Amino acid sequence: MTLRQFGTLLLTASLAVATFSAFSEDVKHIFPSPSLSRLFFFWTALVLLFVGLSCFVVALIIDRLLPAPKGGGFYCRHAQRNDISHVHDLATKLIGPSVSPVQDIRKYHEIDKKFIWLVRKKKQSVTGWTTELPVGYFIVYRISSSGETAIKNGAFNGASPDSSHLSRPGQRCSAIYIGAIAAKWSARGHTSGALEHNISTDARYKGAQWVYTRPVTRDGLRLVRMHYFEPLSQEHEGTGHIYRRALEQNS
């Protein structure tokens, strides 16, 4: 049991004792004021409250003075509706103001609740206090046949796709499109690894032959080249142009 957990236990016990002694008519009837037993309940609650708060204060001081242990676990999950504003804030911080408007992300989330993956890091302090920090995300759109045609002729908007270009849940997709990937420096390797695992194992992409994307930064261009994407047209290479590679899924 950590110091904070012990403090929480004592605070809970003090509140329970205080509530019981102050508001229970049975206790008032059994130990009418000014009974020593009533005073015992009161001082017990006071002592527990003091010790519990002291544990919290000591834990805060220790966490401030001592460095947190290195490491921490990363994990990925689908972003829920209440995560969207946090994803947008993170995207704006990591990529810039050119990211999709938050209302568009909410609209796409209504179409497909599994298109955003949120990468978080669990961090534990010296005293055992665990916090979770958003450190990255990636977006994978399931593309309809008309959407793939739009990608090839340059009419597809990766930042704010037309809803007709996206496959609905339960429908087979014609292709998939990596709409975004961004992460803090310490989580870049894990985020790109999680994306690779997703596109190679997710059964929802069954039927798709190609993975498309459009890198908009130098880091994005370096990443797509590192993962064997090739330009859709050899005449149009570099940032701002469409790249693709064959989708190979593990059986």
Image: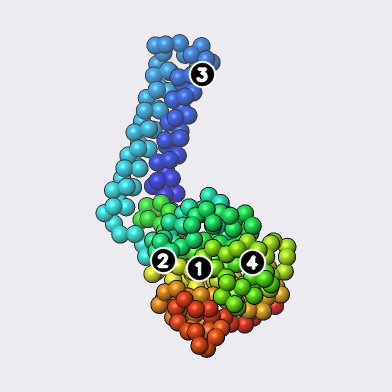
Query: Is 62 positioned to the left or the right of 114 in the image?
Result: left
Mark 3 and mark 2 residues within 8 Å of each other at the beta carbon: no
Return the residue nearer the eye: 41 or 193.
193
Foreground mark, 1 or 4, reads 4
Label 4, on which residue?
165
Image quadrant where residue 189 sits = bottom left
Return the residue nearer the eye: 41 or 119.
119
Mark 2: amino acid = Ile
Mark 2 and mark 1 residues within 8 Å of each other at the beta carbon: yes
Q: Which mark is residue 70?
A: none
How much space separates mark 2 and mark 1, taking CA atoms?
Answer: 9 Å
Image quadrant where residue 243 sits = bottom right
Label 1's element?
strand
Label 4's element?
helix
Q: Which mark is residue 24?
A: 3
Residue at screen point 71% across, 75% down: 207
Q: Is residue 167 visible?
A: yes
Return the residue nearer the eye: 46 or 40.
46
Foreground mark, 3 or 1, reads 1
Q: Earlier in the sequence, mark 4 or mark 3?
A: 3
Mark 3: amino acid = Ser
Mark 1 and mark 4 residues within 8 Å of each other at the beta carbon: no
Q: Is residue 122 visible?
A: no
Label 1, on which residue?
180
Label 3's element?
loop
